[in-house]
Image (cartoon, helix red, strand yellow):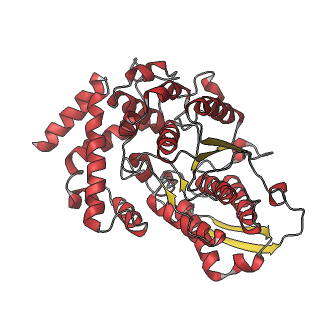
Amino acid sequence: MASLSSRVSDLLDIAGEVYKHDRLVKRPGRRGAAFGPAQQRQLRVEVPVREREFWIESDVSHKLCDVLRWLTRDRWEFDFVPFETRRRQAEQVMRLWSTPLAEGGQVALFSGGLDALIGAAMLSERYGSVALVAVGTNPRQIRVQRELFRKIGVLADGVVPVHVPAGLRGASRLNQERTQRTRAFLNLSIATAAAQAGDASAINLCENVIGAMNLPYSPRQIGIDMSRAAHPITLQKMSELISAVLERRLPIVNPLFGMTKAQGCRELPLEWLPLVPITVSCDIGFTDRRQGDALLCGRCSSCVLRRQALWAAGLSDLDAQDRYRFDFLKGDAGGEALRAMITQVIRLRTVATQWPDLVGAIPEVDDVVAGLLQSGQCETELQAHSRIEYALATYASEWRFVPSPAIQTRISATSLAAAA
């Protein structure tokens, strides 16, 4: 269990400054407009670093700016200055957590969401020794993560919980940029520190295939509206950067990429199912105080996908245990996310298995293909096409399990009209 190296400590400091700038520098221009120069930020960040020569080296600097540009669509520049303050404690102690990882052990990010739980169950069964790295940005999230850790510890002896608070202090939420596209960069940098300390063989970011691809629901949803946190290209670019930092290859993998959320739910062992209602899969569940005790809003795309997945997986009893502020299965009209997702499903039912039509309707699938090829997950374009087509067709078909006559009528009527 080694102490943190100076380069990993530098990476953590860089990630902290990047995350701070991303949240505090608001985007210009009108939200909802086609993404372009008007919404692009020019961000210049000064960071004190321990190994300045390493970070100003052109290849490393390019990798850093490249992944940030991909995640945020902004232009980033860095001024690396000599580090002159006191070293962090983790650079001086030799043991960063009490339980060491076994040889070949894995690190996995653990948000406290349903996909994270599915990934934890899968990885603990597959590898035995897994460090779950929970980056908590607010008290609600930290409370949920700790409760899940307690219960997971009873089910899986080889799981090592690693909790890292990472909130932004002293800043008004009203003045923050709400897109916050560098959260994945921060989380993966923290996971890198855990991987270096535990000599892990890989970092896992667990996200179902639909969430990882995060294809736009409509042509209007473009640019900064699209998060790329778990996109295959993101994982590949981050792997290249952290491999340079560690001076050894460290892959970042998504073990759930081949599964829809419903398929992942079906893989959960029976003894893990009681933990599902504790998880929070909601875009605002940890931050919106208006929800009271209901940590799931019921209207965001994450809530809708969670419900669709539980019903499609035959786990509707677990959905009944969830507390939603708004319930589209009990009279609520649903929000913009539900309408957009239904529109996407209707489109997918007609184009998902025909690649030229799919690219014509959703050009962003080409980026997914590029990521699968660059990372070596697929050897040929045809293989990547087949994998994506299968995932999208499966996802679209799973919507038939959602017990809403209004939703089913709209999907069926539109699909029949398109076929005719």
Left or right: where 383 falls relative to 169: left
Q: What x and y, as percent, mark residue 405? A: 27, 22
For the point 61% across and 56% down, the residue is 188
Q: How many marks?
A: 0
**Quadrant location of residue 66?**
bottom right
Question: Where is 405 relative to 220, above or below?
Answer: above
Question: Where is 368 relative to 415, above or below?
Answer: below
Question: Where is 397 relative to 218, above or below?
Answer: above
For the point 60% across and 80% down, the residue is 59
**Residue most extreme to the front:** 103
Q: What x and y, as percent, mark residue 318? A: 44, 22
- One can see residue 96 in this view: yes
The foreground one among 132 and 361 is 132
**Quadrant location of residue 394?**
top left
Question: Where is 188 relative to 266, above or below?
Answer: below
Q: What x and y, as percent, mark residue 262? A: 37, 36
User: Dividing the image into 4 quarters, which one contains the C terminus?
Assistant: top left
Left or right: where 307 falls relative to 414: right
The foreground one among 120 and 82 is 120
- One can see residue 361 in this view: no
